[in-house]
Amino acid sequence: MSTYSISVMKKEQEAETRELMQRCFDKSLASIFFLHPDTTLVVLFEDKVVAGLNLDVYQVNKQVKMGYLGWLYTAKEHRGKGLAGKLLSEALLFLKSLGCTDVAGCVEGDNPASFKHLEAKGFSRLSLFSQIQRFRFGLFRVWKHASRFFDMGYFFWHLSLDDTRRRSYPENINAFVLGACANTLLFIPVLCGWNLIALLNVSWMQVSHETRGLLFALPLLSLLVRTLPSFVFAHTQKIRLVYRQWDTAYFTALLLPLLLGLPFPVPGNLYIQGSDWSLKTHAKDLARMSLISNTSLALLFILLPNPYTLFLLTLDTFFFFYPFCGFNASRIKREGWNFRLFSYVLTLACYAFLLVY
């Protein structure tokens, strides 16, 4: 009877492993694939590669040597056999033998099938503040290796092999207040015209001293309108949620206002609590929450036309692809064209309203 075996990938298995990896992931992610033969673990069944885990090992600073969990994949016909958990256990032993002090991986917030394995091994989400505290100037290297500068909605799951304790990830009210403050600060260059295109006498919005105070409140107002209605809906459906801000996306949110004078909201999102749930059974609930959020944002824009709310609605409607997976558009897309069409019509109606306003 054939059994599964785990080993470090051999050079002659590289093409087979890469082909399996490409079958298991969306083509849009191909640009950030990596595969290092010396640090890739594969599962063999009847001499064929049926699963793999790509690792990236590098020195962050003098104190930290990172073992990064890059890509974990299993052939469709071999899923449900516990191979992901076995690969992860083997990877931790392997990385410890290489002298790694830290292990980390990035997982999208709506992917409990992946992060429940990390949670079971003692991993936890590491906040931006804790990442800075742990890696210091090496954080740029960590983000570069993990392609983290622009991924929105992915969380940094971390395990210290030296048992160093870290602060818990901010959630709910604390996370919302921090996010609202950050978004407000990032909106200031837009309001004040501190950007490169202003040198060409180009401006996307006219701001008077009388209205600047009101516009200053737009990030907070937009985030509240986006979040509260979907939270109320989930409560009526007895779905337990937690609000989390994203630890990335602020790079884009800083660059876009300074370069083009355009706002780039970083709204975070409401996530189903815990890891004991399935996207298959909750995808429709998440899509409904997203449509409620988009409808609320559209109503806010009609009542108070402004670029911030419209940009946020646009991101939540059309930006369903990587690296924007954390926006509501991804949740809407999973439920098919009826949900997507409603969202498209809603957002395009706001643009039509803008033309005649």
Image (spheres, grey):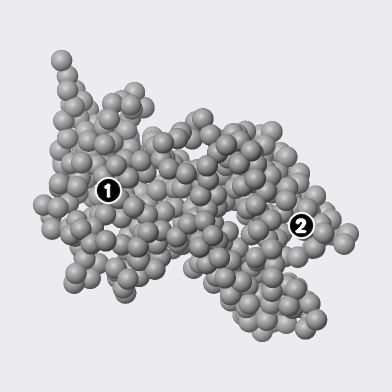
Left or right, residue 94 beside residue 210: left
Q: Which of 181 and 259 is in front in this view?
A: 181
How many marks can you see? Answer: 2
Residue at image location 36% in from the left, 49% down from the top: 33
Residue 77 visible in the snapshot: yes
* On screen, residue 196 above or below 69: below
- Residue beneath the point at 30% across and 55% down: 158
Circle 1: is it few (<14), some (14-19), or many (20+) Cα within 10 Å? Answer: few
Q: Name the residue under label 1.
A: 122
Q: Position of residue 269 (x, y in %)?
A: 55, 52
For residue 302, side relative to residue 132 (left or right): right
Q: Is residue 231 placed above or below 134 in the rendered structure?
A: above
- Mark 1 or mark 2, which is nearer the start of the sequence? 1
Q: Which of the numbered marks, if any, corresponds to residue 300?
A: 2
The residue depicted at 73 percent of the width and 40 percent of the height is 342
Is 309 on the left-hand or right-hand side of 99? right
Residue 348: assigned label? none
Question: In the rendered image, which quarter contains the N terminus?
Answer: top left
Q: Position of residue 179 (x, y in %)?
A: 54, 65
- Crowd tier of the residue under label 2, counting other residues whose Cα lies within 10 Å: few below 14, some 14–19, many 20 or above: some
Q: Residue at x 69, y 33 (%)?
A: 338
* Amino acid at pointer 1: Gly
Q: What element carries label 1?
A: loop
- Coordinates of residue 192 in the picture (x, y in percent): 68, 81
Q: Give the quadrant of residue 42.
A: top left
Q: Residue furthest left?
A: 97
What's the amino acid at mark 2?
Leu
Is residue 41 visible to the viewer in this orientation of the structure? no
